[in-house]
Image (cartoon, grey):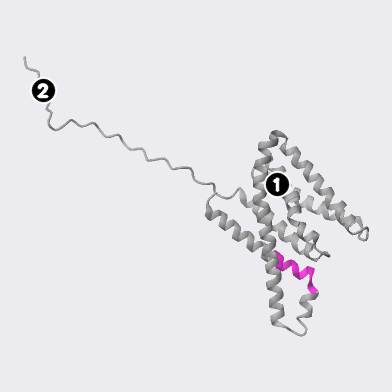
Amino acid sequence: MKTRNVVQLFVRTLAIGGLIGLVTSFFVNPGVYAENMSPFRFMELVGLVFFYLGFGLLSSVISQTGFFAYLYINRFGRSLFRSFWPTVQMLLVAFVAFDLIYFPYKAYDGEVSVFWFIAMSAAIVGIGWFVASIKAKATNPSAFTPALFLMVVMTTIEWMPGLQAEGTEYALLMIPALLACNIYQLMALHRLPAQNPTAKAPVTASPQPTRPAGKKKKSNKR
């Protein structure tokens, strides 16, 4: 993978994260925008736009950090567990899906219905399954499990700062940007051109041996 391709992937993922973060803020915090629309306060609105755009960019950076960590983890897992690595990944996916239900429910002490946490976990697993299926069709069937691992396990790890924040605002703002960035990086990875192998030197005709100028062919005399 060339450096130019890595930079392009970084910039495009950054732009996707910033845009998704900004758009998500319109749905998560519409009241904040409404307060500055009547009366109209231009500078406050500009400040809000830059704040949520910056939050989306931050989410994108977290996503990219997790993505490159996933590339290393996947390579390390294959060398360590060999043929058992897909099974280990599926077990981790199941474990994280359960944790997305159990620990948030315990944190709210039953104040929020467990149904919402089940729906949240099912949505993340469902999105991950759908994206992993597309990835497997675009590349090969063996790519399904690593793609599902990225979309569920790595996305949840990246989401931890939002889940640990007080309230649900930052968690809701963060997860769409993380999912969008991870989907884009995953689907763009196999389209990036690989590093060109060392070019072979052109084959040229070998030079014909030349006779020294001082020597002449002897003639056979009888």
Secondary structure under the numbered disc 2 in the rendered image: loop
The residue where tag 1 is placed is: 147
Q: Residues within 10 Å of mark 2 (few under 14, many from 20)?
A: few
Q: Which residues are magenta?
A: 20-30
The span from disc 1 to disc 2 (Cα, nearest Å) is 78 Å
Residue 46 point in image, percent of width and height: 68, 77
Q: Amino acid at mark 1?
A: Ala
Residue 177 point in image, percent of width and height: 71, 61
State the residue at coordinates (6%, 17%): 221
Q: Which mark is residue 218?
A: 2
Q: Is residue 160 visible?
A: yes
Q: Is residue 186 visible?
A: no
Q: Quadrant of the C terminus?
A: top left
State the residue at coordinates (76%, 53%): 156
Q: Earlier in the sequence, mark 1 or mark 2?
A: 1
Q: Residues within 10 Å of mark 1 (few under 14, many from 20)?
A: many
Left or right: 213 with respect to 89?
left
**Closest to the observer, 132 or 10:** 10
